[in-house]
Image (spheres, grey):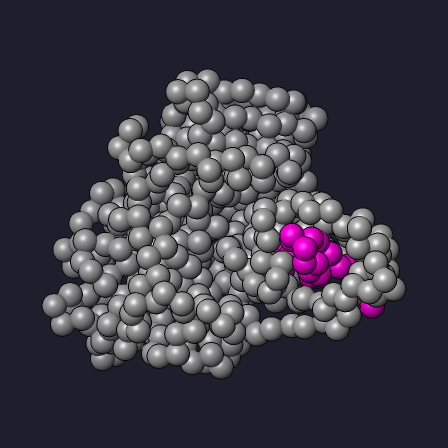
């Protein structure tokens, strides 16, 4: 976060640049009034926007242009050059735009225009909408729920929106909980997605507590400690919860899980007095936690049953690199091992080895919170089954995020993905379809994982593959890894090859297979 702060380069666009030098597909990075500005051509028109992504401050000039959109190289946020609108997550805020005047062959940037994040995206935001629900209830204020809430207002919906969520701090930036925030590099004020009172200012009611039952026939959501909430349309975004292992010592106070902001705060507090940490599980959360605790100068051991960390997702080449990267920073691995029990000052492995530990973090994955949907009689498929519009088996009830299994046009299979950006984008599409806009969810899955100074970008979805093609060397922090099945790259992972990652995403967007073909 805050990565967009850098020395201003390029021409002073307030003074002007030759309009002929601005070629379609190749934006010009300059500055105006002390701020980095990007100017780009779309056909005969020129547009100028702030040059830093509103998500984490990524340099948009290092991204790519796709039609009238610019995509951020870091985490694949996408903005409309004409309006500055954030077209897809993870960015939620729009870019500021500038007037552009062309006179005597020179293009000059003029007045700057900013917009409210939840202002209707444009005058035709609701064009084609066929529904105006009397009220919308959203269960969950995580990635999918928060994005759905905001998209409803951005589409010009003015009626009642109620969000039900158990956590007192939601919505917040969950990916940071295992990354910079846990490492001590991001202050707490970076974590909330919105300032206090933001939702209230935009006419959204946030109800704290647990939803206990969906009355499908009566179109009501029952909840703890309050009257049922009536809905005309319902979005389920209940997310996931950590897998909890049952073992001797599993209730000791120095054992922690990491899913919520409260969990991250508790680990940070414990790390203040701890010296030795054991992380159980070599998942993305587990390894990011290990990296963050090393940056807090704790000794860290990782215990996992795999022969290489993340091998099932990233393959052996990247798995071996990730292991070596952590070892370079002092992490000790105990692979092909499980924990037998946890004691007050150590953990005991199945092979009898004892590892000293005054802090234990369990990160073996998550499971979707589907109980509410299942009890309501919605169709299930190792998650909540939805169609291409994210609607469940009950009309008017949509599901988004970690709980939803949808027909993916890029693999031809029904998939469920537990990643922040995917959940946000699903929430945005579900909101549009609540309003009857009939948008298919056909986005290519994307996630990133940060380990020390190395970030891995991953586009696509590959549960299995015939071969792995490696271009470059992960040890040199310069590599593209393609996961190929039946001659098609189902997923691409990159390290410091941001443009290749974006280009792979664009390629996959145009590449689909018939449903049910895999």
- Quarter the N terminus occupies: bottom right
**Taking 419 as reference, is 325 left or right?**
right
Q: Quadrant of residue 366?
A: top left
Which residue is pictured at 24% across the width and 72% down the height?
232
Towards the viewer: 105 or 482: 105
Whole-percent x and y of residue 40?
Answer: 70, 54
Q: Quadrant of residue 103?
A: bottom right
Towards the viewer: 430 or 301: 430
Whole-percent x and y of residue 243?
Answer: 34, 45
Whole-percent x and y of residue 390?
Answer: 30, 53
- On screen, residue 400 above or below 118: above
- On screen, residue 475 above or below 396: above
Residue 54 on the magenta span: yes
- On screen, residue 303 above or below 258: above
**Taking 79 as reference, is 407 left or right?**
left
Towards the viewer: 470 or 151: 151
Which residue is pictured at 65% across the width and 22% down the height?
472
Which residue is pictured at 26% across the width and 49% down the height?
386
Whole-percent x and y of residue 438?
Answer: 33, 57
Q: What residue range appears in magenta?
A: 33-56
**Taking 291 as reference, is 485 left or right?**
left
């Amino acid at each position: 976060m805050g990565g967009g702060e850098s020395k201003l380069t390029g021409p002073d666009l307030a003074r002007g640049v030759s309009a002929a030098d601005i070629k379609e597909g190749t934006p010009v990075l300059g500055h105006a009034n002390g701020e980095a500005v990007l100017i780009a051509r779309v056909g005969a028109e020129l547009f100028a926007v702030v040059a830093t992504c509103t998500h984490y401050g990524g340099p948009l000039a290092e991204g790519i242009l796709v039609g009238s959109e610019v995509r951020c190289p870091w985490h694949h946020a996408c903005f409309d050059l004409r309006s500055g609108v954030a077209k897809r997550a993870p960015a939620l805020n729009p870019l500021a735009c500038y007037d552009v005047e062309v006179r005597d062959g020179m293009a000059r940037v003029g007045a700057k225009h900013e917009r409210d994040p939840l202002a209707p995206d444009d005058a035709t935001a609701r064009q084609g909408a066929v529904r105006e629900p009397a009220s919308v209830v959203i269960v969950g204020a995580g990635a999918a729920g928060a994005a759905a809430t905001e998209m409803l207002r951005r589409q010009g919906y003015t009626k009642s929106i109620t969000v039900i969520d158990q956590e007192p701090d939601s919505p917040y930036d969950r990916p940071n909980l295992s990354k910079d925030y846990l490492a001590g590099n991001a202050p707490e004020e970076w974590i909330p997605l919105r300032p206090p009172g933001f939702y209230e200012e935009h006419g959204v009611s946030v109800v704290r507590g647990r939803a206990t039952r969906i009355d499908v026939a009566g179109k009501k959501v029952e909840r703890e400690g309050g009257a049922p909430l009536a809905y005309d349309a319902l979005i389920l975004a209940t997310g996931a919860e950590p897998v909890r292992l049952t073992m001797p010592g599993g209730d000791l106070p120095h054992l922690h899980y990491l899913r919520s902001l409260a969990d991250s705060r508790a680990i940070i507090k414990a790390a203040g007095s701890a010296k030795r940490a054991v992380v159980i599980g070599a998942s993305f959360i587990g390894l990011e936690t290990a990296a963050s605790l090393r940056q807090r100068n704790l000794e860290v051991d990782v215990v996992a049953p795999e022969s290489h960390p993340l091998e099932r997702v990233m393959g052996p080449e990247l798995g071996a690199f990730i292991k070596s990267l952590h070892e370079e920073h002092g992490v000790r691995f105990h692979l092909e091992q499980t924990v037998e029990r946890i004691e007050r000052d150590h953990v005991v492995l199945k092979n009898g080895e004892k590892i000293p530990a005054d802090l234990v973090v369990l990160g073996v994955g998550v499971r979707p919170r589907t109980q509410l949907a299942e009890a309501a009689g919605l169709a299930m498929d190792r998650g909540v089954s939805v169609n291409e519009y994210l609607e469940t088996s009950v009309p008017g009830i949509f599901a988004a995020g970690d709980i939803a299994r949808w027909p993916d046009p890029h693999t031809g299979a029904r998939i469920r993905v537990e990643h922040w950006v995917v959940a946000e984008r699903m929430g945005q599409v579900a909101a549009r379809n609540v309003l009857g806009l009939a948008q298919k969810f056909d986005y290519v899955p994307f996630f990133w994982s940060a380990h020390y100074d190395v970030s891995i970008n991953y586009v696509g979805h590959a549960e299995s593959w015939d071969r792995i093609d490696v271009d470059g060397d992960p040890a040199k922090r310069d590599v593209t890894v393609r996961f190929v099945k039946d001659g098609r790259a189902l997923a691409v992972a990159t390290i410091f090859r941001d443009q290749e990652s974006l280009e792979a995403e664009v390629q996959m967007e145009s590449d689909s297979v018939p449903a049910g073909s895999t």
